Amino acid sequence: FPSFFLATVEAVSGFRAVCIASGNVLALAMAGSGLRLPAVGIVQANFASGGTAQVSVGGILTTTSGLDATWSGFAGRHLYVGSGGLIVTQSGLQSGAGWQRIGIATSGGISVAISPDITSGGVTSPAGVF
């Protein structure tokens, strides 16, 4: 799968979306912070601050049990960057946060397809349509 390596500026634990922060280092992507978007990929392992992390930017990634808790059972649905680098379904997004698609949920993993587009406010529908 396509990936690159870059030093981290903070601890990254678990299966998280990351961005490139000031100083050309990795930080957790955060939907609520314009300085922490766009996400550039997903880190699948734990790295201490200052460690060199492998960032996946494409392909199908599998997770261990529990790391997909925010999207387990939602195969085929779009996944987004959430708070603190979490990868979430649309229902896990907060009002006013930036929305960036990062992939599609699969059974036990994610098909990584990072969108460069960031929207704000979310999806709206006509009154009475849910």
Image (cartoon, rainbow, N blue to C red):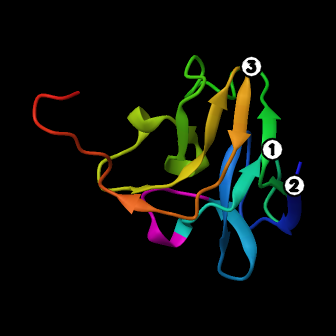
- Which residue range is magenta in the image? 29-35
Residue at 70% x, 20% y is: 107
Q: Distance between the residues labelled 2 and 1?
A: 7 Å
Image quadrant assignment for residue 104: top right
Label whose residue precedes the other's in the sequence (2 or 3): 2
The x and y percentages for residue 75 are 60, 23
Disc ID at residue 59: 1
Disc ID at residue 4: none
Residue flagged by tag 1: what amino acid is it? Gly
Secondary structure at numbered mark 2: loop
Residue flagged by tag 2: what amino acid is it? Pro
Question: Would you place residue 96 above or below residue 88 in this image?
Answer: below
Question: Would you place residue 106 above or below residue 35 in this image?
Answer: above
Residue flagged by tag 3: what amino acid is it? Ser
Secondary structure at numbered mark 3: loop
Task: Specify the farthest residue to the left.
Answer: 127
Image quadrant assignment for residue 109: top right
**Residue bearing the label numbered 2:** 2
